[in-house]
Amino acid sequence: MVKVLIIDDEEPLREAINILGDWKGLGVDQVLEATDGDMGLAMLREHKIDIALVDMKMPVLSGSQLLQIAEKEFPELLLIVISGYNDFEYARQAIRSKVVDYLLKPVNRADLNSALRKAADLLETRRQKESEFINRNKTLNMSLPKLKEKMYQSIIERTFKNQSNEEFLPLIGADTPGNFFTVGILRLLNLEQVRKERFHEDRDLMYFAVTNVINENSGGQFEAFSFASSRGNREFTAIFTMKGSYGEDAAFHSMHHMKKAVSTLKELFGIRCVGGIGAGYSDVMDIARSYETAKASVDGIDLLSLKNGMIAGSRQSEPPLREVPSLTGRIQLIRSALETGNTGNAKSIVGEFIRKWEAAGYFSLGEADRTIQEFIILLGDIAKELNALPDSLSSGKEKGLKGLGVNGDFSSFGEWEGVLSRILEVFTGEISKSLAGDRSSVLENIKAYIDNHYFENIKISMFTEKYFLSREYLMKLFKGKYGWGIHEYVQKVRMDKAKALLSDPGLKIQDISEMLGYKDKNYFSKAFRNYYDCSPSEFRILLSGGEK
C-alpha cells in the first residue's frame, strides 16, 4: 500500500488533486494534506510517506527549501513538484533533488495521474528489489537445516504461508511430483539420565547426536530429516520423503528406518525410545495430518505394557472403554492432609489414585503426561494459596518438572509412579516449611481480632477462608496454643468484659448486653449465669458487698 502527502498552501489546489487522483488504481490507501512547508516537514517526520506532492511557492518554508531538507532527511521519498511558474530556478532545484516529475498549474487529471503512476512504479520496483535482497540474505544467513526445520515446523503448526515462502519449497522436495511425505515421532524415555551421564548435561550435543542417527543412511530415493520437537522436550520429529513412489512404500520404508534408528540409539548411547508413524501423503501440506497421526500413535502407547523400541503405526485400535480415575476429585483430601502435616495420608490418597489407573488395564503415555501436568497445576494452586510455591515456579523462570527440579524420565508404570511421588515430596516440603513459619502468626492474628472485635458476630469461617485452613485443623491449632477453642475464647473475652462493665453502676444491663454483642438482654443474662453461676444483677450485688 502507498501513502501520499500533498503539501500546498492553496486549499483549492489540494482539493483538486484529491478529486483528480486515481488513488484506488494506483494502490494508494491514504492521502494526507499539509497547508504549508513547515507543516509538511513535520508530517514527513511523523508519518512514513512514500510520495509527496510539493508546491514550490509557499510562505515561511518554500518548496525549494523543503526539497533540500527532504533530500538529506528522506532520501527514499519520491517527490512530485507543482508550480504556477515555469521558473528555471525552481526547475533546477527540482532536477538537483531528483524529483519524479514537474507539474505546472493548473494541474489536469492526465498529467497528475501520469506523474503519480511514474512514482508508484518506481516505488514498486524498489520494494521488489528490497524483498529480493531480504530473501537472499535470509537464505545466506540461515543454515539450510535450520531453514528446513522452520519450514516443516510451520507446516506442522499450520502457519505456513505459501506466498512468502514459495521460493523455499524446493528445499523440502515440495515442487517434485511423485514425492510422498511421512512423519515419524521418537520419544526418548530416559532423556535426562542419558543427557547427564553420556553428554555431561550438554543438551545441544545430545540433540545433534540423536538427529544424526535418525538422518543417517538417507539419500537417493529415501530421505530423512529430523529435529527436536517444539511441542515436547523429549520428542524428535522426523520427516521422511520417498521420491517417485507410493504411499504404502513410504510408510513401509519410514517404519523400517525408525526401527533401525531406535536400535542404533540404544546401542550407541543407551537411549530407550518408543515412536509413532503417521500416514504418507503426496501433498507437502498434509505433513500436518501425518504429524497428528504419529503424535496420537505415540501418545496412545500403553504404559502398562510398554517395551523399548516399540513403534506404533498409523492404524491404532481405539483405547478400551474403562472408568477413568479423577485426580481433581481427590485434591481436597490431599489438601487437607497437607494442611494438617499428615504427609503419609497425602501419599496414601495419591497411591490409591495410582492403583485405580493400574487396575484399569490400560494407561497411555498421553494420559501419563497429562496426569503429571495436572498434578503439578493442582498442587501448585494449593501451594500458592498457602504461600508455599517453590521459588523456581513463583519467579516464573522455570515451569513444570524442570521448575521443580524433578527428573521426568519414565519407561514403565512404576517409574511414572515415582515421578508423581517426587512431585508430591517437593510440594509437601515447601508447604510444611511455610505452615511451620506461618501458624504462630496466624493464631496471634486471630486472637488479636477476637480481642478487638468480641462484640461482633464472629464466625470460624471468617478465618478458614482468610488463611486457607480447614475448620477442624484451625480449631485444633488454636486450642493447642491457647487452651481454648475459638468459640470458647470469644465467650471468655465477652464474659471478662462483662465483669468489668458491670462494675460501673452507671451502665444498665441492657446497655452492657448490647456493648458485648448480645441483642437480647435475657440471652446475655443466661450466658452470664452459665459462665459465672450467677446473674448479672446478682453479680452487681456481690460487687457492692450485699447479700444474694
Image (cartoon, rainbow, N blue to C red):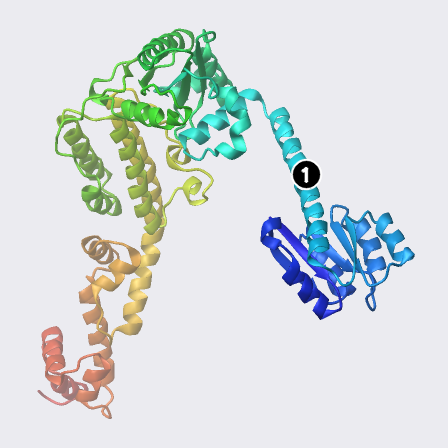
Please indicate whether residue 267 sits to the left or right of residue 410 in the image. right
Query: Residue at image x 45%, y 31%?
Result: 154
State the residue position of label 1.
125
Q: Quadrant location of residue 144?
A: top right
- Image x and y of residue 502, in percent: 21, 85
Looking at the figure, which quarter contains the C terminus?
bottom left
In the drawing, does residue 471 fall left or right of residue 431?
Answer: left
Instruction: Give residue 378's quadrant in the image.
Output: top left
Q: Identify the element where label 1 is drawn.
A: helix
Q: State the residue at coordinates (72%, 56%).
A: 44
Q: Nearer the viewer, residue 116 or 423?
A: 116
Q: Amino acid at mark 1?
A: Thr
Rendered view: 356 above or below 200: below
The residue drawn where x is 32% and y is 21% is 278
Is 495 displayed left or right of 248 in the figure?
left
From where the camera sits, is residue 467 visible? yes
Q: Return the x and y of residue 249 as percentages of the image width and height.
A: 33, 10
